[in-house]
Amino acid sequence: MLDDIQKYLESLGIKDFDDLRPDEKDSYFKLLDLADKSKITLEDIKTHIKQMRTSVEFALSSEKLNKKEDIFLKARLKNYILLESLLERPERAKEMLNQYTKIRNKK
């Protein structure tokens, strides 16, 4: 995102931060703050996938669906379950390794 801001400034003919006026510097810092807040984290993605999975589960359980819709929702559900599994795998592996080392240390 910082590269995008720098490219935008260069397109305006501004090559260095010191070339900016005080009010432009203030705007620049606001843009940097906005860019920093707009970063998507792994936790954001995990939360979104869980929400989508829940909405698909709800649709499957509460609506009368034709065969095509049923198949489509089940496919979406399977994709969300697989994505969750993929994203949680490193955490699960770390947890299992911790459990294994605890057992080994007790012996």
Image (cartoon, rainbow, N blue to C red):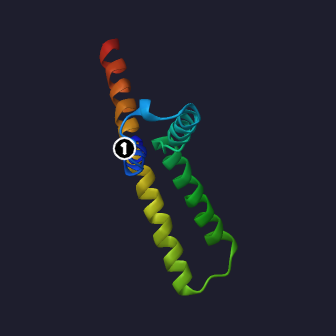
Q: Is residue 87 left or right of residue 48?
A: left
Front residue of 49 and 85: 49
Secondary structure beneath label 1: helix
Give amino acid for label 1.
Asp
Instruction: Give the residue at x 48% y 68%.
Output: 76
Q: x%, y% of residue 26?
A: 58, 33
- Identify the residue position indicated by label 1 in the image: 3
Instruction: Give the residue at x 47% y 60%.
Output: 80
Q: x%, y% of residue 68?
A: 52, 85
Q: Is residue 27 left or right of residue 76?
A: right
Instruction: Give the residue at x 50% y 37%.
Output: 32
Q: To which quarter of the image does residue 63 belong?
A: bottom right
Residue most extreme to the right: 62
Q: Is residue 68 above or below residue 54?
A: below
Q: x%, y% of residue 45?
A: 49, 49
Q: x%, y% of residue 91?
A: 40, 36
**Quadrant of the image for the N terminus?**
top left
Q: To which quarter of the image does residue 56 belong?
A: bottom right
**Quadrant of the image for the C terminus?**
top left
